Image (cartoon, rainbow, N blue to C red):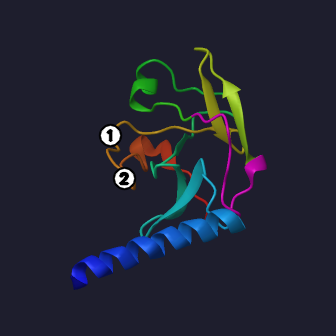
Amino acid sequence: MKKKANLVLTFLFVTLILVVTTTTGLAQPDYTVMIANNPNIGSYLVDSQGNTLYYFTKDATGVSNCKGQCSVLWPTFYTDKIAVPSRLDAADFGMITREDGMKQTTFRGFPLYYFNKDMRAGDIKGEKVNDVWFVVSVN
């Protein structure tokens, strides 16, 4: 009986929190880009699911130089809506159209990518690959 009462109280508490946050506007927005932290590299950009975002040092501002097999290993990141926490500035994000016609989100003019060997949120397996791929640091 006590277990059932605790379950009911928990349900009521969660319901109350949901009602308060949605009616007062305190609910967290749906960020499309967020900040993650790693003790070895500090703060860096991730997508809404916590997947690490990378940049390619061979890119130029507004131009992706990752083509062909490169884009298989390093898929593009694209979101049509930028919503970021207050520590980031949405104005730092933009969009380019690549040579292949795909859209790609940029940060401070540089295209953003995923690494296909990152299997779950928080993976940073692409950091320093060939000394040309790096997480997007926000330190």
* Residue at image point 74% right, 50% down: 90
Instruction: Categorize mark 1 by other alpha carbons within 10 Å: few (<14), some (14-19), many (20+).
Output: few
Which of 84/42 is in front? 84
Callout 2, which amino acid?
A: Asp
- Numbered badge on residue 78: none
Task: Indicate whether 122 appears above or below 105.
Answer: below
Is residue 84 one of those drawn in magenta?
yes
Callout 2–callout 1 Cβ contact below 8 Å? yes
Magenta segment boundaries in residue numbering: 78-91
Q: Report the number of numbered marks.
A: 2
Residue type (three-letter) at the residue carrying disc 1: Lys
Q: Label 2, label 1: how many angstroms apart (C-alpha)?
A: 9 Å
Rendered position, 53 above or below 85: above
Task: State whether residue 61 appears in this view.
Answer: no
Examine the rendering and report whether any part of residue 118 can be seen. yes
Which residue is painted at 64% across and 62% down in the image?
22
Front residue of this view, candidates 64 and 112: 112
Q: Mark 2 points at which residue?
A: 123
Residue under the image location 24 percent in, 85 percent down: 2
Residue 32 percent across, percent down from the top left: 59, 47
